[in-house]
Image (cartoon, helix red, strand yellow):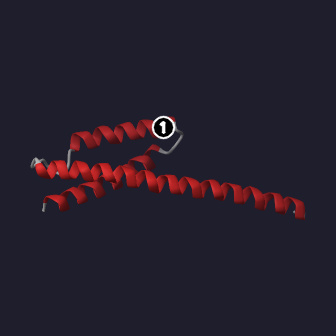
Amino acid sequence: MTDDHATRADLLLAEHRESIDRLDAILVYTLAERFKHTQSVGRLKAQHDLPPSDPSREARQIARLEDLATRADLDPEFAKKFLNFIIAEVIRHHQKQQS
């Protein structure tokens, strides 16, 4: 590979990495915003003596996310695992708020 090709590849790599870094920041801020809302939900559930988990809603959300992932050309199994992880974390927070 010539120096020009290597330089061009380095530039393209840097551009992709900058985009990835911006997207990572968006993901972190989006998750933070999501957790602010789920914490409010947890407080409401605790105040009204509601269970920390809502399996029927969780199932609907997983199906919805799998559909979104398919339409976005993202592996729906990955999306399902990701949402299950988030749901488990939210439930853990809700359980802490109720104890």
How far across and down, in percent of the image, does residue 42 sit?
21, 52
In the displayed orientation, state which residue is furthest to the bottom: 3
Query: Which element type, helix, strand or loop, lies under badge 1?
Result: helix
Determine the residue positioned at 17% across, 48% down.
44
**In the depicted view, which residue is nearer to us: 52 or 26?**
26
Determine the residue positioned at 40% across, 40% down.
65
How far across and down, in percent of the image, does residue 58 sit?
27, 43
How far across and down, in percent of the image, does residue 97 sit?
18, 59
Quick one: label 1, few (<14), some, or many (20+) residues within 10 Å? some
Determine the residue positioned at 21% across, 56% down.
94
Determine the residue positioned at 16% across, 48% down.
45
**In the depicted view, which residue is nearer to us: 78 or 42?**
42
How far across and down, in percent of the image, does residue 37 sit?
30, 48
The correct choice, above or below, for 64 with respect to 85 in the image is above
Determine which quarter of the picture holds residue 9: bottom right
Amino acid at pointer 1: Thr
Quadrant (top left, top right, bottom left, bottom right) of the C terminus: bottom left
The correct choice, above or below, for 59 with respect to 23 in the image is above
Which residue matches tag 1?
Answer: 70
With 10 as the anchor, is 20 left or right in this view? left
Quadrant (top left, top right, bottom left, bottom right) of the N terminus: bottom right
With 12 as the anchor, is 85 left or right in this view? left
Picture mark count: 1
With 34 as the anchor, is 55 left or right in this view? left
